[in-house]
Image: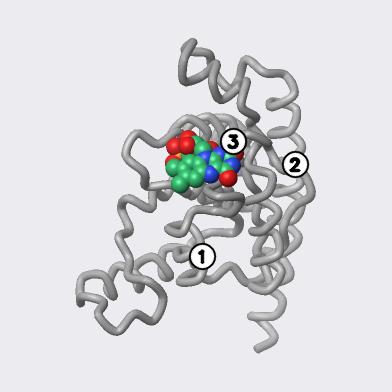
Amino acid sequence: MSKIKIAVIVGSTRIGRFADHPAKWIADIARKRPEFEVEVLDLLDYPMPFFGEARASEAESETAERWKKKLREFDGFIFTVAEYNHGPTAVLKNAIDLGDFIQKPVGFVGYGGVGGARAVEQLRLVFVEMSAASVKTGVHISFPEYLSVVKEGKSLGDYAHLNEAVKNMLDQLSWWGNALKAARAVVTAAA
Ligand SMILES: Cc1cc2nc3c(=O)[nH]c(=O)nc-3n(C[C@H](O)[C@H](O)[C@H](O)COP(=O)(O)O)c2cc1C
């Protein structure tokens, strides 16, 4: 069976962001699994206009096209989700609006006071509307773990409950990734 191509999307572009920790951690774990091919997509590398913005520069519009085209390479997605004012970052929501995730599975690694849960739950609703399949298990990095990484140099992998959540999420991404890839192939062949 061919590999499931997974993009890990870094959902914050803030200077000094925490996002790099969960992005590297989850990508490294996913890469160890034989069924996945993993690439990290950093929104810093995709400076895009707001959706439909009239004043978008040519370069920004081209980047938005490049983003949408890049997403087509993948069979599934993992988002690192920072929580800003109980929602996802604006830069991530805009990148999602500019993207295409139809009939593909999505998973989340949230972080913040309550593990980014409020932002992740908002994104689950967004992805229903975008015809994506949100997998059940989210990975939620709460404040004690967050602080231990930032202030004590600990690793996210030091936490058994986080590793277990990652395993479950990747198992689900694997199942949905295969199922939806096969289903998309049938529909394409019939067209
Ligand atoms: C504008 C702003 C709003 C925030 N709002 C929340 C929030 O509602 N809930 C929360 O848990 N953390 C909140 N935080 C703290 C973030 O979880 C923390 O800064 C985190 O590091 C942000 O992710 P990033 O560093 O990858 O950008 C907020 C941070 C900022 C900058």
Disc 1 residue lies near ligand 1 with CB under 8 A: no
Residue 25 in the image: state x and y as whole percent: 53, 29
- Quarter of the image with the C terminus is bottom right
Q: Is residue 141 above or below residue 186?
A: above
Residue 116 in the image: state x and y as whole percent: 63, 42
Answer with left or right where residue 102 lies relative to residue 38. Answer: right
**Residue at the location (67% across, 58% down)?**
122
Tags 3 and 2 touching, CB below 8 Å: no
The amino acid on which the numbered mark 3 sits, given as a three-letter code, is: Gly
Please name the residue that numbered disc 3 is placed on: 112
Viewer can see residue 19? no
Of label 3 and label 2, which has the lower sequence position?
3
Please name the residue that numbered disc 1 is placed on: 96
Q: Which callout, 1 or 3, points to the residue nearer the camera?
A: 3
Spatial CA span between label 3 and label 2 = 24 Å
Q: Please, what secondary structure does the residue beneath circle 3 have?
A: loop
Spatial CA span between label 1 and label 3 = 21 Å
Q: Please, what secondary structure does the residue beneath circle 2 have?
A: helix
Q: Please, what secondary structure does the residue beneath circle 1 have?
A: helix
Q: Quick one: 125 or 77, which is closer to the camera? A: 125
